[in-house]
Image (spheres, helix red, strand yellow):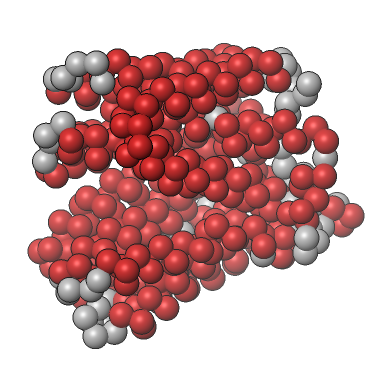
């Protein structure tokens, strides 16, 4: 076996290891969100109480606050393995324990356990992202980000699909312990993988408590932050309202689940890898422009649908387009984010950028609902088209060839 073949095999094993780490985060979290909402409603909980479930996602929104401490502790490979295993054990144990409670009687205990599991998962994600940055060179950042996206989409497919079906058949007390054990098993490949290598850090680059603030202190990073805020905006409003749109077109829950949930998610899973291949072939500079143009075509396509009664093939074409754009945009954005981290603050800097994207996406999703109700879907798609055009012009104007971050 040649040296290049050995190196390539090691690379594949390392990528598969990170795929397992990312899928471990998303299967239980998507299942918990879906299963608890359905089960609580069946147990006659009010919508206001069910709405409290969204509070369990707070650790994922504010995890940048403790990300410098994670970076500071994880100096060596052994630190990463130990830390990720501990967080995953807490995560898995919390999920496993949920299965021994009755949601109709023990809601607050279950809520606390879910919150603990989300905190552990968010903290593990900081370490995983930091390790990913350090374990792969810039040429492989798109590959490891495709593993992150594919793990997210596979987790969503299994967690909100397969395991929900299993819940109905086997019950709460069986499925939750299975999820806990699965989450713990997914971290084992990292523990036995001896091929992942990281370089030692300089002591002068150790993370400090408020390093997440200093990320924004670099003048050259500000155009990049604007890019993070803008890039998804042209499609997020469409994604957040596409299921109500399908309901208004006369599609039932099963049809929406099949076409948007299963076919759409499977498309995103596949396109996450295609996005990495595209970046490797044409480079980040061209890929960023190509995807920005594709995002422009998405609201334009849905706008055209509002002038007719869309038949199923036309609607499915729109779903595949928006899912493809979201997968491509995810790879472009998160690869760009990895390229902008500072030594010693890898997890902190990447986490800060992810939070910026999440806050932007959440705000657009909230606003899009009101805009859709006020101006109807056609008005929403026109606004999304304008935002996508602004984003495309911004990318064309700001980013130059062979630069890591945007420059004017």
For this view, does 127 lie left or right of residue 15?
A: right
Residue situated furthest bottom in the rendering: 105
How far across and how far down the image is residue 406, in percent?
Answer: 73, 26
Q: Is residue 187 above or below residue 246?
A: below
- Residue at point 21%, 63% (across, down): 38
- In this view of the protein, can residue 270 be seen by the observer? no
Q: Nearer the viewer, residue 191 or 319?
A: 319
At 78% from the left and 21% from the top, the residue drawn is 408
Q: Which of these two is toward me, 244 or 169?
A: 244
Looking at the image, residue 290 lies above or below residue 260: above
Residue 168's quadrant in the figure? bottom left
In the picture provided, is 185 more to the left or to the right than 43? right
Q: Quadrant of residue 125?
A: bottom right
Front residue (pair 9, 291): 291
Q: Quadrant of residue 249?
A: top left
- Point out residue 227 in the picture as x, y percentages from the top left corner: 63, 31
Please identify the residue farthest to the front as the structure is shown: 374
Residue lying farthest to the right in this orientation: 204
């Amino acid at each position: 076996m040649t040296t290049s073949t050995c190196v390539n095999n090691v690379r594949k094993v390392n990528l598969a290891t990170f795929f397992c780490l990312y899928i471990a985060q998303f299967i239980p979290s998507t299942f918990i969100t879906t299963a608890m909402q359905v089960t609580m409603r069946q147990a006659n909980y009010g919508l206001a109480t069910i709405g409290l479930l969204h509070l369990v996602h707070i650790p994922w929104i504010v995890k940048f606050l403790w990300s410098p401490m994670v970076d500071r502790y994880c100096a060596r490979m052994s630190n990463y393995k130990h830390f990720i295993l501990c967080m995953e054990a807490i995560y898995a144990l919390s999920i496993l324990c949920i299965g021994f409670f009755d949601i109709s009687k023990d809601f607050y205990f279950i809520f606390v356990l879910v919150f603990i599991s989300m905190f552990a998962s968010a903290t593990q994600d900081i370490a995983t992202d930091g390790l990913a940055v350090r374990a792969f060179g810039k040429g492989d950042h798109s590959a490891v980000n495709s593993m992150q996206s594919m793990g997210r989409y596979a987790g969503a497919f299994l967690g909100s699909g397969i395991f929900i079906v299993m819940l109905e058949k086997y019950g709460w007390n069986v499925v939750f312990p299975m999820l806990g054990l699965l989450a713990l098993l997914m971290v084992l490949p990292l523990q036995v993988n001896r091929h992942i290598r990281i370089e030692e850090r300089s002591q002068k680059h150790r993370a400090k408590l408020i390093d997440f603030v200093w990320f924004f202190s670099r003048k050259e990073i500000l155009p990049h932050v604007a890019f993070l805020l803008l890039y998804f905006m042209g499609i997020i409003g469409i994604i957040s309202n596409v299921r109500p749109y399908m309901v208004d077109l006369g599609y039932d829950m099963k049809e929406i689940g099949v076409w948007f949930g299963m076919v759409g998610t499977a498309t995103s899973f596949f396109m996450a890898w295609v996005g990495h291949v595209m970046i490797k072939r044409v480079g980040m500079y061209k890929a960023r422009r190509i995807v920005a143009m594709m995002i422009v075509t998405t609201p334009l396509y849905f706008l055209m649908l509002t002038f007719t009664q869309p038949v199923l093939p036309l609607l499915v074409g729109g779903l595949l387009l928006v899912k493809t754009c979201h997968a491509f945009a995810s790879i472009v954005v998160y690869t760009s984010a990895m390229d902008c981290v500072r030594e010693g603050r890898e997890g902190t800097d990447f986490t800060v950028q992810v939070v910026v994207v999440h806050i932007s996406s959440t705000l657009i999703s909230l606003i899009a609902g009101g805009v859709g109700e006020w101006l109807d879907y056609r008005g929403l798609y026109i606004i999304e088209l304008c935002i996508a055009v602004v984003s495309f012009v911004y990318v064309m104007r700001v980013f130059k060839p062979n630069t890591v971050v945007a420059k004017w």
